[in-house]
Image (tube, grey):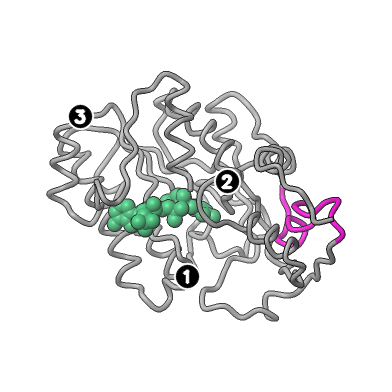
Amino acid sequence: MLGKVLVPCLEERGHKIKGLPREELDVTNYPQVLDLLTYAKPDLVIHAAAYTRVDQAESEPDLAYLINGYGTENIAIACNKLELPMLYVSTDYVFDGEQNRPYTPWDATRPLSVYGKSKLAGEKAVQRHLTRFYIVRTSWLYGPHGRNFVNTILDMAANRKPVRVVSDQWGTPTCTLSLSETLADLIATERWGVYHATDGGVTNWHEFAQAILNGWNARIEPIATSDLPRPATRPKYSVLDKTTLIHTIGREMIPWEESLRGYLELISVRQPA
Ligand SMILES: NC(=O)c1ccc[n+]([C@@H]2O[C@H](COP(=O)([O-])OP(=O)(O)OC[C@H]3O[C@@H](n4cnc5c(N)ncnc54)[C@H](OP(=O)(O)O)[C@@H]3O)[C@@H](O)[C@H]2O)c1
């Protein structure tokens, strides 16, 4: 989802960039990673691949750690060997959500799920092997390409299915289009470090669904997390503080409502007659 939007965004800014699907680069295959980076010798490696099935990870932790932990370590070791900087995309799920105020990049991590733990393993690998790195934590992604919450809610409403959405998990939806612009701004700075990058503002999944279906004749029932048991525990409150990023790139984040409007216009959603 992110990679396919990031590639054209960086191309538009004049970068020469090669997007690599799993078929061309399997991050769990160290010789392949090293060969490819040795041959390409890029100015920067952006690692946006991941095992992202949050609930399924609870029943296949070995695979989640293999891809997110070991796979990320492979890239970090190759970057170290070839003296290349690296950008690693991480997640708000490295936090436990118990703090009730936005998380800064310096706050203690305590992931609740296998997915969050495996992404944190990736962060640690990057920090262990490199000094020139960006770790960019983001949250609640949606955008063109692939399944995401926005499309799921739209499909449910279009098929007149009852929409029940949790209203007690707080965070910030982030469009891959605006995140790509932010990443493009950040990599121009060469100010290495850990950053939090999401769209602006705070909401919960129920309010987010209401904004997606704004103007539709659809009822969205708010429910509690406990009404919808899922294998992976999510943080209750995973809003990320973006102050350091805003100072570094010299601009504010676009509000999540504005990003969502742009995305809905892009996909030109029509409600049923
Ligand atoms: N989605 C979110 O809400 C969210 C929130 C916070 C952070 N993030 C992070 O943002 C980044 C981008 O997420 P996304 O939503 O764009 O994920 P995505 O749509 O699931 O894409 C992940 C990509 O990684 C590929 N991949 C999986 N295993 C691989 C391997 N061994 N070698 C090479 N490629 C492999 C997948 O290929 P296949 O399709 O072949 O499996 C897929 O193309 C990830 O680091 C994710 O952890 C996502």
Tell whether position 235 is magenta. no
Q: Is residue 63 left or right of residue 142?
A: left
Q: Which residue is mark 3?
A: 41
- Amino acid at the residue labelled 1: Ser
Q: Name the mark nearer the viewer: 3 or 1.
A: 3
**Mark 2 nearby-residue class (10 Å; few <14, some 14–19, many ≥20):** many
The extreme front residue here reads 273
Q: Give residue 226's position: percent from left, percent from top.
A: 68, 80
Q: CA distance from mark 3 to mark 2?
A: 30 Å
Name the residue at 73% across, 75% down: 224
Q: Which residue is mark 1?
A: 113
Q: Is mark 1 within 8 Å of ligand 1?
A: no
The extreme top residue here reads 14
Q: Is residue 222 above or below residue 88?
A: below
Q: Give residue 258's position: percent from left, percent from top.
A: 73, 38
Q: Is residue 265 above or below residue 8?
A: below
Q: CA distance from mark 3 to mark 1?
A: 35 Å
Task: Please provide the residue range marked out in magenta.
Answer: 202-217
Name the residue at 30% across, 60% down: 67
Q: Give residue 237's position: percent from left, percent from top.
A: 65, 61
**Mark 1 nearby-residue class (10 Å; few <14, some 14–19, many ≥20):** many
- Amino acid at the residue labelled 3: Lys
Name the residue at 35% across, 44% down: 47
Q: Name the mark nearer the viewer: 3 or 2.
A: 2
Name the residue at 27% across, 48% down: 128
- Amino acid at the residue labelled 2: Gly
